Amino acid sequence: MSRLAPKGILDYDEALRHLRIHRTAPPQDLADLVECHWEVTWDLPAGMVHRQRNLSHASVTLTWESDGAWVYGVPGKVFTRESSGSGWAFGVKFRSGAARAFFPTLPIADLTGLRAPLRELVSPGLAIEGISDRAADFSERVALANGFCRSLRKGRAAPASVQLATYIESDRSLLRAETVAEKAGVSLRELQRLFRFEVGITPKETIRRFRLQQAADRIQADHDISCLRLALELGYFDQAHFARDFSAVVGTSPDAYRKRVRKASILGARDSRQRP
């Protein structure tokens, strides 16, 4: 099973002090629609609450938790999950725009910012609870989730917006929705309509989410990177514009965030050395 590094998890080193996090790539026949499978487990001391902040992706996620199976639409810019006691959550993260292949009659924007019961959005004959009831470990949950996704997909092709979102994610110099419209050969209005039905948010917001997620992950990987260099890597014309975007979403400046993750990394390394 191919392991992947987490994406968009703020203060990742601090998160690893409280959570166990796994991500794995999908099989080849689902890779055009599914970005990854993930699982988070925790076992915290009595009375402790861990609040994990994440930069929101531009996609829909299927999630199995202790209270049932859910569809999470594209969330707000930053979302926070609280964990206490012991527990787990397992999810299938779709690629941006891919949810349309699984829910073909539903405008994906109708899910934006919502958590909907999965059983209300799928055919009654599809088994959705087995992933949490029968699975003993992450590998088994992944196998069951793959079978479920194949049944839900019913052989449908990837929606057009998946390729456009991949283009947005891969070309870090891209900052304007008009450029995406030109790439697609459609008007900006047509592109906005397409993203509403297939992605759930606007092309402009999709671009910004990819860039800021990439920024946070880059800082996590390199605590010493300069804000100017990072801004240029991500296609910003000036550092100030990048810093404003980052602060508006993350809640702190890129430089302050960099200092925070450096400190957490040092604490995490110290904890590792102290463990028996």
Image (tube, helix red, strand yellow):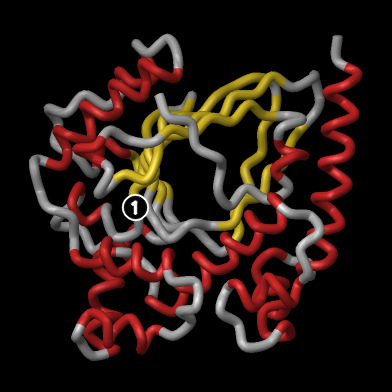
In the picture, measured across the screen, residue 53 lies left or right of residue 121, that is right
Q: As shown in the figure, which amino acid type bears the numbered disc 1?
A: Arg
User: Where is residue 74 drawn, in percent x and y?
Assistant: 42, 58
* Residue that mark 1 sits on: 95
Position of the C terminus, as image quadrant, is top right
Q: Residue at x 65, y 57 (%)?
A: 218
User: In the image, is residue 100 above or below residue 196?
Assistant: above
Closest to the observer: 23 or 195? 23
User: Where is residue 188 drawn, in percent x and y?
Assistant: 29, 89
In the picture, measured across the screen, residue 104 lies left or right of residue 218, that is left
Near mark 1 (Cα within 10 A), the count class, few <14, some 14-19 or many ≥20, is many
User: Where is residue 177 drawn, in percent x and y?
Assistant: 39, 84
Q: Secondary structure at mark 1?
A: loop
User: In the image, is residue 150 above or below residue 77?
Assistant: above
User: In the image, is residue 90 above or below residue 153?
Assistant: above
Q: Residue at x 25, y 66 (%)?
A: 161
Closest to the observer: 110 or 7? 7
User: Where is residue 115 drawn, in percent x and y?
Assistant: 42, 47
Is residue 8 among what the camera can see? yes
Total marks in image: 1
Is residue 70 among what the camera can see? no
Q: Residue at x 44, y 85 (%)?
A: 176
Which quadrant holds residue 98?
bottom left
Which quadrant holds residue 49?
top right
Position of the N terminus, as image quadrant, is top left
In the picture, measured across the screen, residue 271 lies left or right of residue 108, that is right
Q: Residue at x 35, y 68 (%)?
A: 167
Extreme residue toward the left, this view: 155
